[in-house]
């Protein structure tokens, strides 16, 4: 098992908005999916600590959040802004020249090149300090053997924390936690395990592995190994950017597909130029439509193989946008590629 450092940005969207809008700092803030004028029709994307104190949480209908606290501050999610900030964070992390895997827009894991917890903690302190000073954002870092355990340590250290659990202490760290604390165990798997009286990781560790394999297949074997303090997960190096996208406002609101496709073609070419410049390939292609009433819809398609093809982007984006245009007049369109890796499958560490 390799020593890993797992970073998770704290309430990322809300924290980004607090930097851009310091007047929200210290106030309960919700970042939602809908424009402010129709916010009660949307859902909470994320919220800050002050809002969480009232029971507000991600994926909650905004209407329910305001029942908990009618004085919540509200702002519509700005994905382009968050992705730009995320790209800056990931590019900074990649400057350490360590093996790194970007897990999501606000999470990444790095493989430490020394087997020394003190050195790893010093690195964690340095990273936290730099992100705070450069971007004004808090993050939490967990250090342990294996990336799954490092993530679990990170989760246990939130918010704005830094924590390490050494290999000889990992079993003690795991035992009393509910099984759903293991990444990958969702409500359905939790309920299956609970149905055979497995509620804690310690109970999972003591279960006959064949019972778990019969119930969950190869995932059951993996869970048994993890529950017994062995994390064999490895870094899968990918691009240090989350996505590449371009958006443009149309000359006028329209539902004419020919006019919209002309803009899609321009945006697809710009995206591919950036793809080539960054020397990456992609698996996911998406489009975005912003309608005349400022509501947004996004649609994407993920392929089984990576590509850098301009023709594939244009063909896919043109197909996807058709499903979004027939609803109401469109004001703005966007094209995005994501699930990025460096061309050749691995980022150079030199």
Image: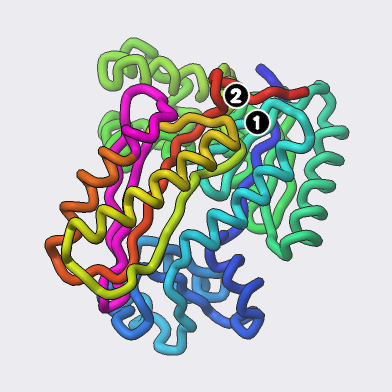
Q: Residue placed at 52% from the left, 23% from the top?
A: 226
Tell whether label 2 touches label 1 (CB within 8 Å): yes
In-image side of 235 versus 331 (left or right): right
Callout 1 secondary element: strand
The picture quadrant where one finds residue 7 is top right
In-image side of 324 versus 113 (left or right): left
Rendered view: 46 above or below 2:
below
| Chain part drawn in magenta | 284-313
- Judge the density around disc 2: few (<14), some (14-19), many (≥20) Cα neighbours within 10 Å: some
Query: Residue 98: percent from the left, percent from the top?
Result: 74, 28
Q: 204 and 18: which one is in front? A: 18
Taking the image as drawn, is residue 194 in sight? no
Q: 195 and 185: which one is in front? A: 185
Residue 321 included in the magenta stretch of the image: no
Callout 2 secondary element: loop
Which residue is under mark 1?
Answer: 100
In-image side of 93 versus 107 (left or right): right
Rendered view: 44 above or below 342:
below
Q: Quadrant of the C terminus?
A: top right
Which residue is under mark 2?
Answer: 235
Q: Residue placed at 59% from the left, 37% from the top?
A: 277
């Amino acid at each position: 098992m390799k020593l890993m450092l797992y970073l998770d940005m704290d309430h990322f969207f809300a924290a980004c908005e607090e930097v851009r809008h310091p007047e929200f700092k210290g106030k309960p803030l919700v970042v939602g999916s809908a424009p402010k004028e129709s916010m009660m029709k949307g859902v909470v994307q994320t919220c800050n600590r002050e809002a969480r104190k009232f029971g507000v949480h991600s994926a909650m209908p905004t209407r329910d959040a305001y029942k908990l606290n009618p004085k919540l501050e509200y702002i519509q999610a700005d994905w382009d802004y968050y992705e730009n900030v995320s790209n800056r964070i990931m590019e900074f992390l990649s400057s350490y020249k360590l093996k790194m895997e970007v897990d999501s827009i606000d999470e990444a894991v790095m493989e430490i090149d020394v087997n020394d917890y003190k050195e790893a903690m010093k690195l964690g302190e340095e990273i936290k300090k730099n992100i705070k000073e450069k971007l004004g954002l808090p993050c939490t870092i967990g250090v342990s053997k294996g990336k799954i355990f490092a993530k679990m340590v990170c989760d246990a250290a939130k918010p704005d924390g830094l924590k390490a659990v050494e290999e000889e202490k990992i079993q003690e760290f795991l035992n009393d936690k509910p099984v759903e604390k293991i990444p990958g165990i969702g409500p359905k798997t939790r309920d299956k395990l609970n149905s055979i009286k497995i509620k804690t990781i310690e109970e999972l560790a003591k279960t006959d592995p064949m019972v778990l394999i019969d119930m969950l297949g190869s995932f059951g074997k993996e869970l048994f190994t993890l529950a017994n303090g062995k994390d064999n997960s490895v870094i899968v190096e990918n691009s240090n950017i989350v996505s590449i996208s371009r958006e443009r406002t149309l000359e006028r609101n329209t539902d004419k597909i020919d006019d919209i496709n002309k803009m899609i073609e321009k945006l697809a070419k710009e995206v591919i130029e950036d793809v080539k410049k960054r020397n990456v390939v992609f698996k996911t292609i998406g489009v975005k439509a912003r309608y005349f009433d400022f509501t947004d819809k996004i649609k994407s398609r993920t392929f089984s193989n990576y590509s850098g093809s301009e023709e594939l982007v244009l063909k896919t984006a043109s197909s996807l946008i058709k499903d979004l245009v027939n609803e109401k007049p469109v004001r703005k369109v966007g094209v995005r590629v994501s699930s990025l890796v460096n061309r050749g499958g691995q980022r150079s560490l030199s």
